[in-house]
Image (cartoon, helix red, strand yellow):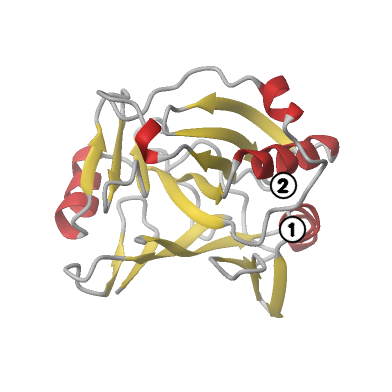
Amino acid sequence: MRRLLELTLRVRDLKAQLAFYRDLLGLGVEADPPRYRLTPEDGGFSLDLIHDPRAPLRPYPSVGLYHFALLLPHRKALAGVFQRLLEAGAHFEGAADHGVSEALYFRDPEGNGLELYRDRPRGEWPQGPLMFTAPLSLARLLRESPGPSPLPPETLLGHIHLHVPDLAEAEAFFSGTLGMAVTLRTYPGALFFAWDGYHHHVGANTWAGKRLAPEGSTGLLGYVLLAPPEVPPGRYRDPSGARVEVVG
């Protein structure tokens, strides 16, 4: 399965970020200061927090991370984590039915976007435009909750969505250099890219314009992609400025 394996964030308030990702979402932590590596029980991905107490907070919106998305195995798991985050007063931004998936949107204590979602079976994906945005009934979702729950052990890093300054540059990198297919062009100011017929491993949008964060700000530093064998392993910079490592 082609997917994201790792993601690294620079953080300023380590205590608040660990309270969110470790204590609330339930990820395990391995500390090697200033790096704190968080993983689910099954080890399907890692989230590295690099602590820099002097880092300025990244202004939002600006070129960089729009959100990263954790893929949960089924709807009941999504409902249980949603209930846990709501009861804890986490910053909830909204929800959507995207046809291919059901998604919940949050922000961590430093404003990084976090999507929690579950995929529908591929046989139920829409015909025509692969994704759309429709309302998601939160009351109906919560009725399926088994009770407030942390992330399940098999949680994966499903995709990443970036603010970029130029869509043509994003297409040249993700499609031209990394060999991903463009899976959707119908959202104004956005493109979506994937390997293996997935709906998207990467999204890119120009909704932040060309606004740049100060040097050394909090937020996305880089990520690691598990690519098909025809994509040469290597290290790159994506159009948002993040470091990208491609492994086979």
- The relative height of residue 185 versus residue 139 in the rendered view (above or below) is below
- The relative height of residue 213 versus residue 233 in the rendered view (above or below) is above
Q: Is residue 179 left or right of residue 189?
A: left
* Residue bearing the label numbered 2: 109
* Residue bearing the label numbered 1: 13
Are there few (<14), some (14-19), or many (20+) residues within 10 Å of tag 1?
some
Q: Is residue 120 left or right of residue 88?
A: left
Picture mark count: 2
The answer to whether residue 209 is seen in the rendering is no
Determine whether label 1 and label 2 are within 8 Å by CB: yes
Disc 2 is placed on an element classified as: loop
User: What amino acid is labelled 1 in the image?
Assistant: Asp
Are there few (<14), some (14-19), or many (20+) residues within 10 Å of tag 2?
some
The answer to whether residue 206 is seen in the rendering is yes
Image location (x, y in percent) of residue 11: 64, 60
Image location (x, y in percent) of residue 79: 70, 37
Work out how far the residue at label 1 is from the one at label 2, CA to CA, in angstroms: 8 Å
